[in-house]
Image: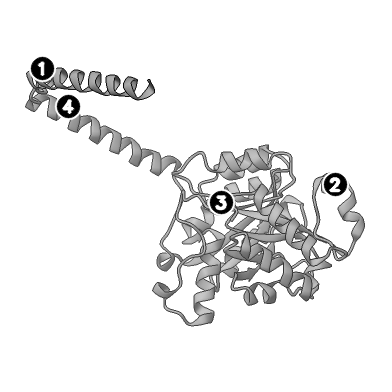
Amino acid sequence: MGSAQRIRDNFGFMVWLAASVPLFWLAPRAPEAPAVTPGERAVAERQQEIARGDARMWEVIHGDRRLPWEQAHGHLAIVIDDVGREFIYSNRLLALPFALTFSIVPGAIYADGIQVRARQDRRRYRELMLHLPMEPVAEHMMKQGAELREDFLLHSDTAAQLREKTARAFERVPFAHGFNNHMGSSLTADGEAMRVVMSAAAAAGAGFFLDSRTTAQTRAQEAARIQGIVSGARDIFLDHDPAPEKIRAALRLAVERAKEEPTVIIAHPSAAVVAALQTGLPAAFARGIAVYPLSEVLTRAHREVSGAPPDHVESVGPNPGERRLGQAASRE
């Protein structure tokens, strides 16, 4: 019975198909689009020119202040640490027309919102990093205030725990292209722990590492190099002393240093830091001192050390707007 039904169904379909095909051929053709008149073409071209003019005007007024590396008289990378713990000052720093780099604390209350905000305007690429909490010498610093939300990498952790915590932190900051240590004056001095952390970071897709240098005994850069991670170290803490005049003096020092060699600054979101950068960076730019994503500064330093020509070592950071999935420094 089922076989007979299938035969009837197939026969009915063939009859329908045979009847329908001629109708497709006999159906009238769609009308051709009307020809574009010279006047309409002129209007369209004028609209395109206005749009291009608006884009150029936006770039002049609101666009980032950039210089090709070879044309700059000095080179800065500015890393904003502790991002995600507050929103107002981080948002103001995001709005500055300079390519600052933002290091996000994985357990921070505004971490997700800041990541979304940083990627909303593709015309202003901002590099994001993971600010990976690590055990400091002063253990009590992990157990107060905002630190209570963080999952610190500890001396007492097993290798498996260090790997798991590192992987989990990168998952919480999925657009991080690299990372630096938050605190860590104790753990970064432990060479074996650093080898485990760097191995886990490489597996998570980290392209670069910045040693915040919270201790002179750090072994972090050495461990990063063993894992093939491009690395560098902080040169100046902008707000080691949070007094506004001290922050301005530290920025002036960094600008002068940048004339001699690329300089990496670490700062934290605050009203004083925002004010110093709002006035200091335009003045520095007028003298040919430009700000670059941290990955570019570290990559160029790596080229010089390795002796590789520029076309043999690609930047570890992504192109502006590129999405790279998972793959805070203490002043103690």
In space, the residues marked 4 and 2 are separated at their CA atoms by: 61 Å
Image mark for residue 148: 2
160 relative to 67 in the view: left or right: right
Please state which of the two labelled residues, at mark 4 or mark 3, is closer to the viewer. 3
Q: Name the residue under label 4.
A: 43
Residue 55 against residue 246 in the figure, above or below: above
Classify mark 4: helix, strand or loop.
helix
Q: State the residue in front, 234 or 110.
A: 110
Residue positioned 83% across, 49% down in the render: 147
Q: Mark 3 points at which residue?
A: 325
Amino acid found under the numbered disc labelled 3: Leu
Q: State the residue in front, 138 or 278.
A: 138
In space, the residues marked 1 and 3 are separated at their CA atoms by: 51 Å
In space, the residues marked 1 and 2 are separated at their CA atoms by: 73 Å
Residue 301 against residue 142 in the figure, above or below: below
Task: Pinpoint residue 95: horizontal percent, then vertical percent.
Answer: 55, 42
Q: In which quarter of the image is residue 160?
A: bottom right
Amino acid found under the numbered disc labelled 4: Val
Task: Work out whether mark 1 precedes mark 2 in sequence or the reverse, and give the earlier one.
Answer: 1
Classify mark 1: helix, strand or loop.
loop
Residue 64 against residue 198 in the figure, above or below: above
Q: Name the residue under label 1.
A: 27
Amino acid found under the numbered disc labelled 2: Leu
Please state which of the two labelled residues, at mark 2 or mark 3, is closer to the viewer. 3
Q: Is residue 216 visible?
A: no
Identify the image quadrant of the C terminus: bottom right
